[in-house]
Amino acid sequence: MKIKTADVELEQKFMHGGMKTAAGKNRVIPIADKILPFISEMYNPKHEYLVTGHRKPMDYQKMR
């Protein structure tokens, strides 16, 4: 997950992100009400990325 903190809009409940294809990049991703508390807890404007692992973006392989 390499979503930058600056790309998260908590008030509007969406974030910009995506990867792999041109169509998938920079798309609007709605934040469901059920996961909003988790996203809010991870959100820290001092960090470059929403989900971090030792100051680097956390990738999918490390999250499993």
Image: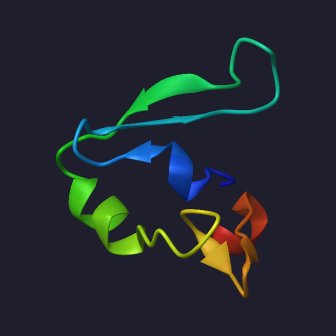
Above or below residue 41? Residue 59 is above
Q: Position of residue 5 (x, y in %)?
A: 53, 57
| Residue at x 32% of width, y 40% of height | 31
Give percent across and percent down for residue 7.
Answer: 53, 43
Q: Is residue 64 visible?
A: no
**Residue 18 drawn above or below residue 63:** above
Describe residue 16's horizontal placement relative to residue 11 as left or right.
right
Foreground residue among 22 and 61: 22
27 vs 31, left or right, is right
Position of 11 compared to 43: left or right?
left
- Color theme of the render: rainbow
Q: Position of residue 52 (x, y in %)?
A: 64, 74
Picture quarter with the N terminus: bottom right
Q: Position of residue 24 (x, y in %)?
A: 68, 20
Asked whether residue 20 appears in the rendered view, the answer is yes
Marks counted in the figure total 0
Residue 38 located left or right of residue 62: left
Tell me the residue at 61%/53% (across/down): 4
Q: Residue at x 41, y 71 (%)?
A: 42
Q: Residue most toward the bottom?
A: 54
Please name whichever residue, 42 or 9, is drawn nearer the observer in this view of the structure: 9
Which quadrant of the rendered structure holds the C terminus?
bottom right
